[in-house]
Image: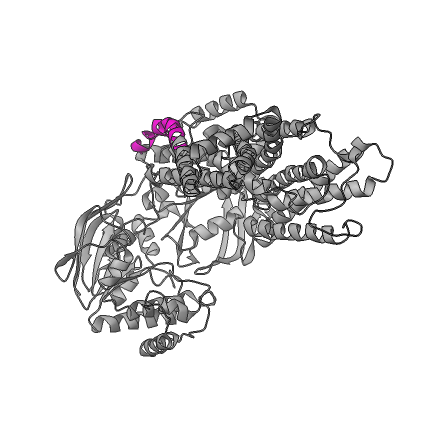
Amino acid sequence: MRCKEALLPHIRSSRWIEFGIQSLSVLMALLFTTLVLVMAGAPPLEAYRQMLEGAFGSLKRMTDVLATWAPLIMVTSGLLLTFTAGLWNVGVEGQIMLGAIAATGVIRALQETGLPPFVILILAMVAGMAGGAAWAGLVGLLKIYTGIHEIFGGLGLNFLATTLILWLIFGPWKRPGIASMSGTEPFPEHLWLPVLPGLRLSPWTLILALSSIVVVYVLLMNTHFGLRLKAIGKNIRAAHRLGVPTSRYMFLALLGCGAIAGLVGALQVTATYHRLIHAISSGYGYMGLLVGMLANYRVLWSVLVAFFFAALNIGGIQLMVTLRLDSTLSGVMQGALVLFVLLAQGSQARWKPTLIPESRDDA
Amino acid sequence: MRVEMRHIYKSFGPVRALQDVSLTVEAGTIHGLLGENGAGKTTLMKILSGYLRPDRGEILLNGEPVRFASPADGLRYGIGMLHQDPLDFPTMSVLDNFMMGCENGFWLDRQRARRALQELARLFGFDLDPEARVDRMTVGERQQLELLRLLRQGIRVLILDEPTTGISAPQRAQLFDTLRRLAREGKTVIFVTHKLEEIEELCHRVTVLRQGRLAGEAAPPYSPRRLIEMMFGRSLSKPERRPALPGEPVLQIQNLIAGDYRLRLGRVNLTVRSGEIIGLAGMEGSGQHLLMRVCAGLIRPWEGCICVRGRDLTGKPYCAFLDAGVLFVPANRLEEGLISGLTLTEHFQLVYPTGGYLINWERARAEAQRRIQEFNIRGEPETMVEALSGGNQQRAMLALIRKPVHLLLLEHPTRGLDVESSMWIWQQLKEQAQQGAALMVISSDLQELLEYCDRIIVFFGGQVSEPMNAEELTTDQLAQMIAGYGWRG
């Protein structure tokens, strides 16, 4: 028993070790990407310079990074709710799509009416949140009542959502005369979410992103709701025994995440594409999962990691223009980063001294 | 094959599971390994079969020292173990299970395996359908399958860990016949059990372990008294005690039958009164944990009903039991009891939320500090529960008991604790009883049960004894009942 207490200071001091290992894995990811660049026959240093240039070279580019960062951090903060409750909500991608579908539906239904544009836009946002929450709720019901794991339920519903969009684009919502992958008829311009003059960034998106960070942070750090989610995520059996209604809280976490994801979908429709397209989610759902994992499921780290990912995405475009490299290189870097960080965490867990229960049920 | 284990030591962290245990088993004999829960029987056998590596000591097969790195290594030397819970693949067929680990090469030869299976089954008189799915079979049949699989792999030493738990009487007789036959053929059989009558019926020799040490050996004719003494230790003096004043009935159980896939518990009729402490004794897996979980509302009974303070709670969800003041404190502290990764403050906030939706961490911390002092926990409000020592984890679990509590159910509340901590825990429990709660406590420490409980129930293979007055019982009587004597009468 004594030696267990002696472990206490060790657990505290490991934060620096953790930081060191995290930095090391970033370095490894850079090395790996450099290797890929060399194999592709591109000058690595020049490529990195171009990426930086592409992300921060001008005001327009910097705001483009922000325009990517905003939806990404929103999805991530939503996912932090489900991550905290120990849920792998990979269905977030479908939840974004359903938000987009619901928002498009509202705008199409109301664009001919004389309602003021901001009322229509707000209704579209609310519909988006409802759509995302409903899709996430389905995942929750499947899990709670039929025992289907949220990963499989979520993946299935992602496929359904994609199919639903395709059907809408080529069926009931197709452009008059032609049906094509370019999506539905664009909305009239007064129903576009206003952007800063000459830029692609909408101040509303930014405001929503910041408030979603604050809301999730407060929920997780300062409320009983957040504490119960954390308890469920760490040990669902003990949480249940201590009287936490586990099913209800997992369902609520999914609804919360779905609502935020749905709102992102609505923003994609109203601020970015102004119509429903096949790739409406821009992969923000899966990217959000990566950001959350890389940030070790912490809100404030997620803000930085999401910014880094957004910068990589925008900077990658420049590579295509100047070095004629495919812009998917940023994807290579993001993937490598996540793998190396997970690798570091895994090996760290192996080296750590494990706590062994004192009594075993060996008969 | 002659098996020798010499001076084996094994620790799990601070727990010494085995200390200087030696064992010699001659070829062609059935050797019993006897001991109560936690005596180290399973650990010793896992070392012999290659599942665990000893810290010190050596294993000799026919006089040659060997070293196993894995169970596969053990099998290569011809040592096979039949585990307490069947280690098979429930969703696969009998034939597929049978082929597991036997077939070499790339292609499966189902025909050959089927013939081998049928031949072996005929030899031993087992009736196994090769196409049946394993999860639809009884534990006894699964055991037969596992046995045949091991035999096909050419084992020469067979270890059986509590093989008779959960199988029917005919299956048991068949198993014993099979074991005798294998011994006649020159195989070495090691039979792990805590049931004395099985030792008497089957074994040519027996080794007894107690608390990780060698307690003695014996050969037939066995003296049950002597074996019980070796299992539980001597110095069984009777402790002092004070009578309790039981009040209103708190828990009423009528005609209850419950069970899981290997054990049927029933019928239970029991009334527990306020202010009373009932001790539940029995070998691990005899039904006491099942009854505890049924009373806590975590498992639904098959038949019968449970009333708490006059309210029928049969079939109600766990939260209804919680609301009725039923509280369950499990044995596995970090699996079901506490949440690793949360601090003490966070635990207290889960159970006693302060304020509205928002948590006031200042106040929460002060509140936690107060409870930490009240329950004498050695830790800070920010300490993660997994960093606490076992005794302090147990104190934290007592501190997390919601008020008002009417029925308090505890599994092994003092397991692994030092004397001082144990006494403190019992003092707390006595206080709860004096304040009017009814208590049910599982413990494998008989001395402790006799000392602190008012009445004691003994469990054996799903049978439940009448509650007996602790005052009129001796440790010897209790030990005999636990080992299966004095039933069926």
Task: Give the x, y percent position of residue B15.
Answer: 28, 41
Q: Evaluate whether residue A85 shows in this view.
A: no
The verdict on residue A18 being magenta is yes
Task: Give the x, y percent position of residue A355.
Answer: 35, 38
Q: In the visual, does B136 lie left or right of B173? A: right
Q: Main secondary structure of the magenta part?
A: helix
Q: Evaluate whether residue A138 shows in this view.
A: yes
Q: Quadrant of residue A60?
A: top right
Q: Nearer the viewer, residue B253 or A312?
A: A312
Q: In the visual, does A137 lie left or right of B179? A: right
> At 61% from the left edge and 43% from the top edge, which residue is drawn?
A251
> At 80% from the left edge and 50% from the top edge, which residue is drawn?
A176
Q: What is the basis of the colouring in this image?
A: one colour
Q: Quadrant of residue A88?
A: top right
Up-down relation of residue B168 to residue B124 (above or below): above
Residue at the limit of the structure toward the left, as seen here: B63
Task: Give the x, y percent position of residue A81.
Answer: 57, 36
Q: Which residues are magenta?
A: A1-22
The quadrant the N terminus of chain A occupies is top left
The verdict on residue A9 being magenta is yes
Q: Nearer the viewer, residue A148 or A44?
A: A44
- The mark tally for this picture is 0
Task: Give the x, y percent position of residue B149.
Answer: 33, 68
Up-down relation of residue B322 to residue B345 (above or below): below
Q: In the visual, does B79 lie left or right of B164? A: left
